[in-house]
Amino acid sequence: MKIKDIGEQGLLKKLKGFCPHDTIGDDGAVLSLDPQQQLVVTTDVLVDGVHFSDVTTPPQSIGWRAVAANLSDLAAMGATPVGITVGLALPGDVTASWVEHLYQGMSSLLAQYNTPIVGGDICRSQVTTVSITALGQAFPHHIIKRSTAEPGQVIVTTGYHGMSRAGLELLLHPTVATNLNTETRKRLIQAHQYPQPRLDALPYLWEVMETQAIAGMDSSDGLGDALVQICTMSGVGAQIHLSKLPCVSMLSQWFNSKQALNWVLYGGEDFELVLCLSEEVASQLVKTIGNQANIIGKIIEEKSVILVDGNQEVKINLDQGFQHFS
């Protein structure tokens, strides 16, 4: 059955089942927040043909990834999720089951963090678009910003980069990387279709921030982009060591090595955290977080982001990352 057959009210009736019955039904949701914490708000828009397609992402994955993008932004701010709203624009010939599967994907990830869908809106459109606004909260001294990195700090990533882009390549071109075993192929595709926001790292980061600030952001637009953004906002530079990016050598087993490096730096949608803090604390933090967390370089005074490969230095270019209007 298609959306145009059941109409707006018919679709809303189906979607209400994904929301708490005591939160929706009025013109707005009323939420109770901790008065000692600050509200953190973030919005992401996913558009058919730009962020997803029928070839690479089933509707459950679209819903999961839409939520993951927003929860990753909250994690990057040091905030825990309180709820989300969903704006949905759909052509009339989309099936009702497609929309239900979309919401099932959202709910599957939200359930991990006990986070409800507290409202939203639907409308007719020629292009399928999913817009999510996530609400979070954080204590003032637990908020992570891009603008507080300082020379002498080291740079920590919470996990590998490039895996999501490699997974996308496998979905677009199933015949590539023929020497890739089934388990690793599945792992790379999973990284693209069902990324995990790094909210799990927050308790460890909060503990660190009891004594020192942490600068950082997430790597949704690529590791290279995150490094440049942090350095620009903080008025510093960064030096990254290729040998500290293990995913480059790992992906080079199955893909072109130049391609692998490009994906690690500019592939995007890995939704890891990129953090700047003192070296002594960072070493312990990496051990505590696990899951491929690693110190990849350091913050420097020179206002450039440089990749060091042996004796060679290469400047990281922001324009190579994902830019919507380039």
Image (cartoon, grey):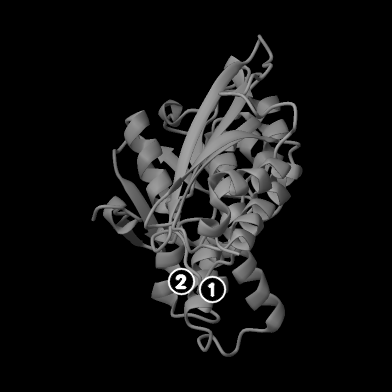
Q: Which residue is mark 2?
A: 260
Q: Hey, which residue is sitting farthest top in the picture?
A: 35
| SS for callout 1 | helix
Viewer-nearest residue: 140 or 212: 140
Does the image show residue 190?
A: yes
The answer to whether 235 is drawn above or below residue 297 in the figure is above
Q: Quadrant of the C terminus?
A: bottom left
Residue topped by disc 1: 251
Question: Which one is earlier in the sequence, the residue at label 1 or at label 2?
Answer: 1
Total labels: the figure holds 2
Instruction: Name the residue: 59% across, 22% down.
Output: 212
Residue type highlighted by circle 2: Ala
Secondary element at tag 2: helix
Q: Which mark is residue 189?
A: none
Are the two marked residues, 1 and 2, in contact with CB atoms closer than 8 angstroms? yes
Q: Determine whether, in the image, residue 298 is placed left or right of residue 286.
A: left
Q: Is residue 180 above or below residue 319?
A: below
Name the one closer to the observer, 150 or 27: 27
Sort mark 2 into few (<14), some (14-19) or many (20+) by Cα contacts within 10 Å: many
Residue 56: x and y in percent read: 52, 71
Residue at the (39%, 64%) spot, across then down? 49
Instruction: Find residue 320 and report its image quarter.
Output: bottom left
